[in-house]
Amino acid sequence: MKTIITYGTFDLFHIGHVNLLKRAKSLGDHLIVGVSTDEFNQSKGKSTLIPFEHRMAILESCRYVDTVIPEENWAQKADDIKKYKVDTFVIGDDWLGQFDELKAQCNVVYLSRTKQISSSSIKQALQLLSQLDKELG
Ligand code: C2G
């Protein structure tokens, strides 16, 4: 069995996340996803709209995902790769080169990001709509 692992915040789950997970799963048989906890996101300087428990449940409902674990810190990846006997670490190419140290333990694959969509752009659109709503009354 070929085990793949990836990590992320996955706030406001969107097609960019689906594309990444679908392609990650196609590289093996079992996909593990580490979902960033709210506390870890704070240390990443990322605020989320969807709470951690909901983000975990949404990932668990995704057909491409087999196992969901909390991502609590940057350093856990090496231990996770050992613990779950991971063959390939996958992440979007916005992280290109950032996790090359993991090549000592497993394959490392950076997949191209889906263009024109991000959790932050969805958040901005929502904020604009709520501002318009307030102004128009
Ligand atoms: N992604 C993508 N295309 C997008 C948006 C996101 O392919 N349009 C990918 C990212 O490259 C990442 C995954 O979807 O591989 C999750 O994205 P985020 O939730 O933004 O994750 P991030 O905050 O980058 O956290 O330790 C790694 C970090 O936890 C990654």
Image (cartoon, helix red, strand yellow):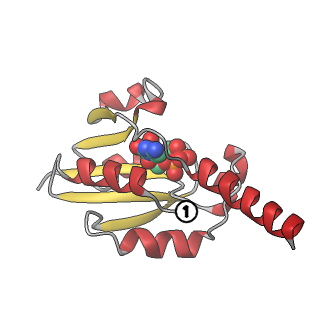
In-image side of 63 versus 46 (left or right): left
Residue wearing tag 1: 12
Quadrant position of the C terminus in the picture: bottom right
Residue drawn 11% across the image and 56% down it: 1
Q: Is residue 55 above or below residue 21?
A: below
Residue for point 43% across, 23% down: 97
Which quadrant of the view contains residue 69?
Answer: bottom left
Number of marks in the rendered image:
1
Q: Is residue 73 visible?
A: yes
Whether residue 77 is visible, yes or no, is no
Q: Quadrant of residue 37?
A: bottom right
75 or 131: nearer the eye?
A: 131
- Above-or-below relation of 27 to 39: above
Give coordinates of residue 3: x percent, y percent: 21, 53
Q: Residue at x 21, y 59 (%)?
A: 30
**Of residues 125 and 66, which is closer to you in this image?**
125
Q: Position of residue 53 (x, y in %)?
A: 56, 75
2 relative position to 81: left or right: left
Q: In terms of secondary structure, where does tag 1 sit?
A: loop
In the rendered view, would you say 103 is above or below 123?
above
Mark 1: few/some/many CA within 10 Å (<14, 14-19, 20+)? some
Task: Check disc 1 and give the amino acid type.
Answer: Leu
Q: Nearer the viewer, residue 74 or 44?
A: 44
Residue extending farthest to the left is 1
Is 129 placed left or right of 66 in the picture? right
